[in-house]
Image: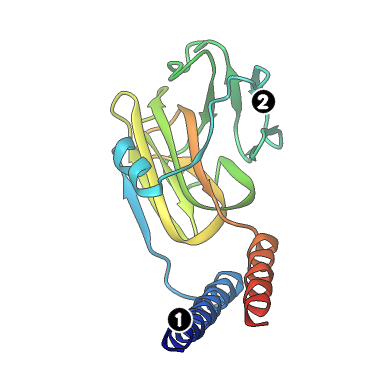
Amino acid sequence: MAHYMLSLYQYQLLKVRLMNLFTKFLLISCTLLSSTAHSVTITTFTDSALWEAAVSSYSQEDFEMSPSVTASQAGDTFTLDDFEIVIDKNHGSIEIDSSGTGPIIGGTKSFFGDVHSVGGTEPQFQTLNFFNDISAFAADFAEGDADGITLHVLGQSLPITFSGITFFGFISDTAFSSVNITGGSTGSGFYVMDNVKFVPEPSALLLFSLGLIGFGFIRKSAK
């Protein structure tokens, strides 16, 4: 009898814990799906190993499978597997060789962007639009003949000063789907970008499905 009462107690305790976990899961899901305004916190990294350790896993685009396109004009779009690069102003290209505009960073191809205007005199030059929300972004950059660039995300400006091949990444506590690129503070010209890394956010459908599975498990256990 004592053994039966102990087992019943353990069962009731397990059910309570599962209900608590499910409640917390629903609260987290609702928070992720809500549009409640809050201040955005972005943490930047200049060391690739530290960024990779912070995010654990990520997806990457190295442009190796992309067709080579040179001297595209404003309004053109490069469509990749997980995002597109829109040429809002000036030019952009995915090139096999440097063609005098800068070095290939990795492999045989890199993206070359034109930012020949100082700082914020134009709203943006190239925009990376991701097909799904992400929470972290990083890439390797290099100087073509520009001194640096500025990334704009969620209302914040993140300047990058080039020193050879320069890693720059960041993690946001708020999901985002686009990164705008403008010129640096003083210089102008081309920059090079490669090895774009990003962390996809779980979709709303996935979160809802997991919630239903968890609720179904609890109901089944209670019977």
What's the residue type where badge 1 is placed? Gln
Question: Label 2's element?
Answer: strand
From the image, tell me which residue sits under label 2: 72
Tell me the crowding category of disc 2: few under 14, some 14 to 19, or many 20 or more residues within 10 angstroms, Cα based. some
Left or right: residue 42 versus residue 197 is left
Left or right: residue 17 versus residue 68 is left
Q: Quadrant of the C terminus?
A: bottom right
Residue at 49% x, 78% y: name it: 14
Instruction: From the viewer's side, name the closer residue of 193 and 21.
Output: 21
What's the residue type where badge 2 is placed? Ser
| Vertical order, 5 against 43 (above or below) | below
Labels 2, 1: front one = 1
Give percent across and percent down for residue 65. 64, 20
Tell me the crowding category of disc 1: few under 14, some 14 to 19, or many 20 or more residues within 10 angstroms, Cα based. few
Residue at 35% x, 48% y: name it: 54
Q: Quadrant of residue 215?
A: bottom right
Contact, mark 2 vs mark 1 (Cβ under 8 Å): no
Left or right: residue 58 versus residue 178 is left
Res. 205 visible in picture:
yes
Q: Quadrant of residue 163?
A: top left
Res. 185 visible in picture:
no
Give percent across and percent down for residue 11. 51, 81
| Vertical order, 185 against 147 (above or below) | below
**Looking at the image, how many numbered discs can be counted on the residues?**
2
From the image, tell me which residue sits under label 1: 10
